[in-house]
Image (cartoon, helix red, strand yellow):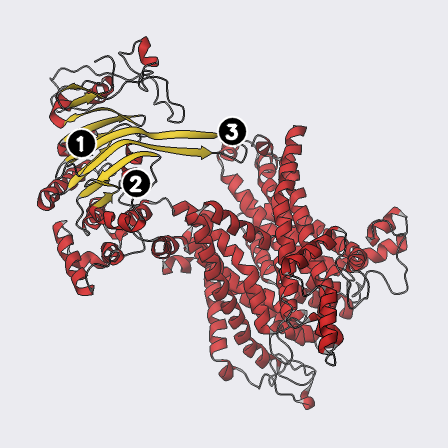
Amino acid sequence: MRMDALKFVGKRLLLMIPILIGISILTFAISNTIPGDPARLILGPKATPEGLEALREDMGLNDPLYVQYGRYMGGIFQGDLGQSTYSQKPVSADLIRYSPATFELTLFAMVITVLIGIPLGIISASKKDKIADQITRIFALIGVAMPAFWLGLLLLLLFYLKLGVFPGSGRLDSGMSPPTYITGMYTVDALLTGNWPVFKAAVMHLVLPGITLAAITIGMITRMTRSSMLEVLKSDYIRTAHAKGAPENRVLYGHALRNGVMPVITLLGMAFGHALGGSVLVESVFSWPGLGRYAVNAITYLDFPAVMGVTLLIAILFILVNLIVDTLYFFIDPRLKHN
Amino acid sequence: MVRRILRSPLSVVGIVLVLIILLTALFAPLIATHSPTEVDLLSKLEAPSAEHYFGTDEVGRDIFSRIVYGTRISLRIGLLVVLISFPIGTILGAVAGYIGGRVDQVIMRITDVFLSFPGIILAMSIAAALGPSIENVMLALAATWWPWYTRIVRSSVLSIKNSEFIEASRALGANPFRILFKEVIPNAIAPATIQASLDLGFVILSAAGLSFIGLGAQPPSPEWGAMLSNSREILRDAWWAATFPGVAILLTVLGFNLLGDGLNDLLDPKQR
Amino acid sequence: MALLEVTNLKQHFTSKKGVLAEKTIIKAVDGVSITIEEGQTLGVVGESGCGKSSLGRSILGLVQPTEGSIKFKGEEVTEMSSKQMKELRKDMQVVFQDPYASLNPRNTIRQILEAPLIIHKIGNKKERKERIESLVAKIGIRKEQLNNYPHEFSGGQRQRIGIARALTLNPKLIIADEPVSALDVSVQSQVLNLMVDLQQEMNLSYMFISHDLSVVQHISDKVAVMYLGRVVEIANVDELYSRPLHPYTQALLSAVPIADPLQKRNRIVLQGDLPSPANPPSGCPFHTRCPMAVKECASIVPNLEEKSPEHFAACIRV
């Protein structure tokens, strides 16, 4: 079995290589569509033709595209994603600095999604067409159709501005210093160092953006769980269990749950991707100092290397998460092992 | 067929919402009570009232009228993006599925690359590269949307490509071009069409998001996402400015989603 | 000169499951030689999976043959350019088994029948219209029905439309792949009679592929029996049905229901399943199921030999 798992993961890793190359080509191509001459952008309108030409030569802009791409790839492999024109620091350093905040927020949102979305889907399926189901379905429909950044604004309006129960921006109360750096995720680090006031503040700051981000994925996961459960409940072996006179709850929780919820796990990777994408918008609503806010700032200041760095990092993260989810699923679903 | 749609109450809600949206866009000048862009500093930040149904913003523009005109912008974005990405995705998917082999491999690997980005991130970086404007947001969204149609169309082409009517056409001497456009695509396009109707909503949602972070429509355009972005400055004083544009987006997306779901059930009654 | 002359035709498919799996070669057609004369019908019978449909598709050029020669009116088909091939299409047409799958559901009958004429740029709009209308008159469909869609017709009507489509280009040869097996028995004879009438009227040749021996008997001049990609027996229809030589043919014929219950018959029941064409038996492919098999059958591949005048069989025991 261990060999099987190794082979499975190995194969997936191999399949990732062409995708990663494709991603790098695509990001390189996007960087190259920037209208206008980067040399002119840097030197400004007063540049002399000789100055422009010298800078172009210096920046390698006169090299053929494939040489430029080779240089770009070589840079990526050395962790060199260029210099952020806004922060004046290497993009890779900025990404390392801002990533933990985004991980913390996204993971928190995923936990909320799983804790709410899956149970809602199960309830909805088991009470098909009853009131609970109808309400859940409408709730899920709205969740899917709602702009998350708008929900963020409404939550901010209600719980921060009107009621004042939750903080509205940042990761900690003002004046509070972050916990000792271990993972960079404040809640985790505060927990590990036993720093309770910081832990409490960090959790309070997570609540509103976390719920907002989770709203994007809860609707999706609820719908998927519901339809997957319904499929299982219709299947022959469930009807057999009913026919044998097994009590309703045992049928539902014993037989149906395992088989109904399992396919949803494969969707968690996709949900994570949605959440990562959504973080760009949500972080900007709550001034959450993560990758999303960094990217939006970079856009405002026309800081290209930074935008492309975030894009590349998020794409790679998305692929890795899907790999992890597939591997998890491989261990859970016995059928795949023989394939 | 019509009767079957009408039997599902949610589909009816979808149809009604979509109709309202279409009519609003069509008759915006008749429905709007004020100019969408006219500044009236004397009546700034007014709460909803009989004069200003949804209140006014920080320079006294009527939010109701802005939302009404915004319908046109959003619909135009949704339609154009789908109209660009749908044919591209459909043709690539049909070619990949019908021809197979190397061509299929290449097209599908490219598709995989595009789908390995969370959609909004890819659109964001393309739009950022092209420069902030609504046209560029449309281009960026179209560039990220086509792979979905490629996948859907490819799989339905695979399911029909060995049909006898396609073999018959080959036996008649039809060239691959004719077979693709007259025989394969018309019979493989239905699932993608349903996806397109769902996507009209999701495209509008994404475009609003991109405008929200400053990439799409620029002020003073009454685009809903841009209006929400603007409302952040006056959140404390004008809850209405942050509320109503979002409701408009929600209802629009919901309308197209319900319509798409209804169509989907029509095509495949087993799905429910 | 025969209209169609097929010599030693082979049609092999390679199938590969998964990236690392080994290739398997399926010999769907493995060295078939047949001829069809002008105005004549060759019946091709065999169980499903014997390669009779692959033979038809290979002759039609829907798949590229692996080996062998196909001559149509003396010209080598396998070496034709795509332009010559397109010309050939006018002379060689096909009718498929499933009348529900062989007509594009999104096109009207008029569009379906007009397509061949448009593809080959025949006639102007008015001429095409006249041609289509005279054609449907022949198959018993009213011209008012031309604007209907396939699903509005019965199976028998659809199959007649399929035949009409094959006839639009005035072909010499029609390859009919199980054209009636999807139809009700009552409708089968209607369609068969129509095919016979059209043959006489238009001097058509048919290659009539079927698993049903009684249907083949009704329409054929000559019959070829196929087993695992090879022709095991071929003869004139009366000869073959009254004096079958190959044990496989005998087994097939013994299973055909007959009208006269008093007639004495010995039903020969074949043992075992049809072997996989991916892994055919050694020697005579039929020896694993043959009631007459002897030891040599497992090693000697029998050739198709003329056992009596114009009657060929591939069996070392006869």
Q: For the residue marked with disc 3, what is the amino acid?
A: Lys
Percent across and percent down for residue B246 are: 62, 70
Q: Position of residue C294 (x, y in %)?
A: 30, 9
Q: CA distance from mark 3 to mark 1?
A: 53 Å
The answer to whether residue C27 is above or below residue A178 is: above
- Secondary structure of residue under mark 1: helix
Residue C78 pos. (x, y %): 30, 40
Which residue position holds label 3? A244
Give the amino acid at mark 2.
Answer: Thr
Q: Sort mark 2 into few (<14), some (14-19) or many (20+) by Cα contacts within 10 Å.
A: some
Horizontal relation, residue B37 to residue C136: left or right? right
Image depth: mark 3 or mark 1 in front: 1
Q: Which mark is residue C216?
A: 1
Residue at the disc numbered 2: C78
Mark 3 lies on a secondary structure that is: loop
Q: Give residue C90's position: percent from left, percent from top.
A: 22, 49
Tag 1 subunit: C
